[in-house]
Image (spheres, rainbow, N blue to C red):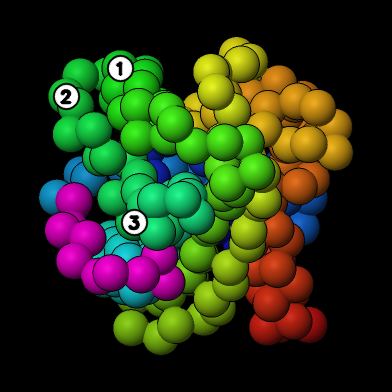
Amino acid sequence: MRILFATSNPGKIREVTQVLGPLGVEVVGLDSLDDIPEEPEETEVTFEGNARLKALYYAKHTNYRCLAEDSGLEVDALDGAPGVYSARYAGAQGSREEKDQANNKKLLGALVNIPADQRTARFVCAMCVADPDGTIVAETQGRYEGIIATEPRGDGGFGYDPLLYLPDVGLTSAELSPEDKNARSHRGHAARALAKLLERKAPH
């Protein structure tokens, strides 16, 4: 089975391929297309809504079975912000790394006087697979709990990974090996749940 993953983020493609690849699912990103459709506006207010919107849009415009996800960070002390606006939280322009750094800096500034026991947070990932005819094939969600650190640590991962501290291992998400991160991350949980649904629906 070949699935178009509606992203150009190599980190996301790598994480999902680690889960779906062993099942015989070939995961390709938008950069594999000769003609990439214009990005749709993410107008929904939930991760699930945006994942569904993107999966249906790209499946229709590319004629491929399409996987889309929407993910972000919910911080309890900020009433769930940055939430669906996680990727564009600071409104920065530039490379992916520059945007990540600006987002992390803004988040740390927003939490500067918040004590450790009130810095609870989680990554949330909603996934949706849709067919070109508009059929929703599967939808899943995964969560990844932690605490926002007071400074970034680690060179792995991307986005807010250097700030999500995991008390049980004493490391941030960016300090985990790729295998350990995928075993516990929101995207890993959502992808494994998705794999089970796709296996169940596959022709035998």
Whole-number angstrom distance, CA of label 1 to CA of label 2:
7 Å
Find residue 2 and report its image quarter.
bottom right
Considering only vertical position in the picture, is 138 above or below 54?
below
**Quadrant position of residue 14:** top right
Q: Quadrant of the N terminus?
A: bottom right
Q: CA distance from mark 1 to mark 3?
A: 19 Å
Q: Amino acid at mark 3?
A: Val
Q: Earlier in the sequence, mark 1 or mark 2?
A: 2
Question: Which mark identifies residue 93?
Answer: 2
The residue located at (70%, 68%) in the rendering is 193
Q: Which residue is mark 1?
A: 98
- Residue 147 can be seen in this image: yes
What segment is highlighted magenta in the picture? 39-48
Give the residue type that dot 2 points to.
Gln
Name which residue lies at 22% across and 60% down. 42
Q: Residue at position x 58%, y 72% from top?
A: 140
Dot 3: element: helix
Secondary structure beneath dot 2 equals loop
Counting from the top left corner in percent of width and height, residue 178 is at: 72, 29
Q: Residues within 10 Å of mark 1 (few under 14, many from 20)?
A: few
Q: Secondary structure at mark 1?
A: helix
Whole-percent x, y for residue 160 in the image: 49, 32
Q: CA distance from mark 2 to mark 3?
A: 18 Å
The label number, if any, that marks residue 84 in the structure image: 3
Instruction: Return the x and y of residue 100 as percentages of the image width and height.
Output: 37, 25
Residue 25 can be seen in this image? no
Residue type at numbered disc 1: Glu
Secondary structure mostly seen in the magenta stretch = loop
Q: Is residue 67 magenta?
A: no
Q: Disc 1 vs disc 2: Cβ atoms closer than 8 Å?
A: yes
Disc 3 crowd, CA 10 A, few/some/many (<14, 14-19, 20+): many
